[in-house]
Amino acid sequence: MDIATINGYPLSSPIDPVQKRPFFGGERHLRKRDVVLVVVETRDGRQGVATAGASSSAMREYFEGDSQGTFADIVEDSVADALEGETIDEITDAHDLLAATNLPAHLETEAISAIDVALYDIRGKELGAPIYELLAAEYESEPTTEMPLYASAGMYMEPEGYVEQARALEELGFFGYKYRPGIGPDGDRRTVDLLAEAVDEIELMLDVHTWWKLGESYGRETVRELVEHAADRGAYWIEEPVEPADHAGYVELAETGAPLAGGESEESPAGLVKLGETGAVEFLQGDVRHHEGFTGCRDAVEYCDGRDVEFVPHNFGTWLGLQANAHLVAAAPDVTLLEYPVFEDDPALAEATIDPGMYPFDLAFDIIEGQPDIEDGYLSVSDAPGLGVEVDLDVLEEYPFVDGAWTEFHYDDE
Ligand SMILES: [Mg+2]
């Protein structure tokens, strides 16, 4: 592949009016969702695309104050400088060229992630093959192109609100319902109790990224009790119950026997494997958009293969990112389940009895032409070459970048 141009377009999908979600001890404001669309063009006119963010985790982005706008600048400067005019034989050659730039580690990882996905898109188009076929050849696996989805929704609401969502998503056939507690220890306990009674088929997952942020008010003992309580009620997993870097905290909580999940916030593929090696998580959540693409996720996938830890991609963002992670799930051995983030007015969930979306994120849908093939809670990956989807470049006009943080946590004691 002879790389001609690389562009990074920062885009914002406004949340208007701003959503204000009270949690225990504060209020979270959601103003917009940002995406950087990365477009790579080769000299023979092929185009590869990927989405990227500013850092490994939306939560870290909030803490570090990075913005998607600065990441798009990095794509247009350092990344373009390193790759434009280069001939790439192996996709890892591009990793090496990016590793030779002087980018801070987390930005280098983010850049490699986007470029890896975009180059696989191009390679697939060159060969006339979907990415999952290229990956299946690498893994020596038989691809499975239909995969169960778990729905990722529910953010700090009354317990009854979560129940309503879980029921609607159960009816649509989703494998699981993942929600975000954080309304206070009593409310969180009541939510699990009500959910466990209300649904049969659908599994329940808790994404408790708030608990560790509420460390002061919840306290470690309460977090441990809540983890045990959720496990008692049959929770399928409990995600990020402690600060991501606190591997010892994971190990301690794992002693309760509760099924834990984590990994999305790991800053590198090596970090992902390390979290797996603690033995504390039953579910390891790498993401091609944050862990150096298909290439970077491979070590973690292979670590999990044949062990008591399952690789389940973290996937939170647009339908373009969904396709990227779906190709990995289709091809990677022992990887079967994919996260489906649920936003308001999702055209693919038009049959839902209520709108189970967390907040508006129209760009998530509009970024591709058409819509993913979702039926009865299963996604079928397109067998068209590369990622198998066309980006709708009208989004460059329709979703201009808006400066500032996408979300803020306001604490009562501040
Ligand atoms: Mg999460």
Image: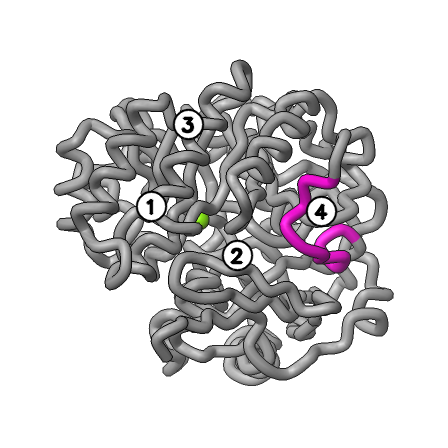
Disc 1: residue Cβ within 8 A of ligand 1's nearest atom: no
Residue 279 seen in render = yes
Q: Amino acid at mark 4?
A: Lys
Q: CA distance from mark 4 to mark 2?
A: 14 Å
Q: Identify the residue at horizontal 46%, vertical 29% (top origin).
A: 204
For the residues marked 3 and 4, what is the alpha-carbon distance in whole angstroms?
A: 49 Å
Q: CA distance from mark 1 to mark 2?
A: 42 Å
| Mark 3 / mark 4, whichever is N-terminal | 4
Mark linked to residue 116: 2
User: In percent of the image, x 53 and y 28: which residue is there?
Assistant: 176
Amino acid type assigned to the residue bearing label 2 in the image: Asp
Locate residue 284 relative to residue 79 in the image: left or right: left
Labels 1 & 2 near each other (Cβ < 8 A): no
Label 3's element? helix
The magenta stretch spans which residues? Answer: 355-365
- SS at badge 2: helix
What residue is pinned by disc 4?
Answer: 125
358 part of magenta stretch: yes
Q: Label 3 crowding class (10 Å Cα cut-off): few <14, some 14-19, many 20+?
A: some
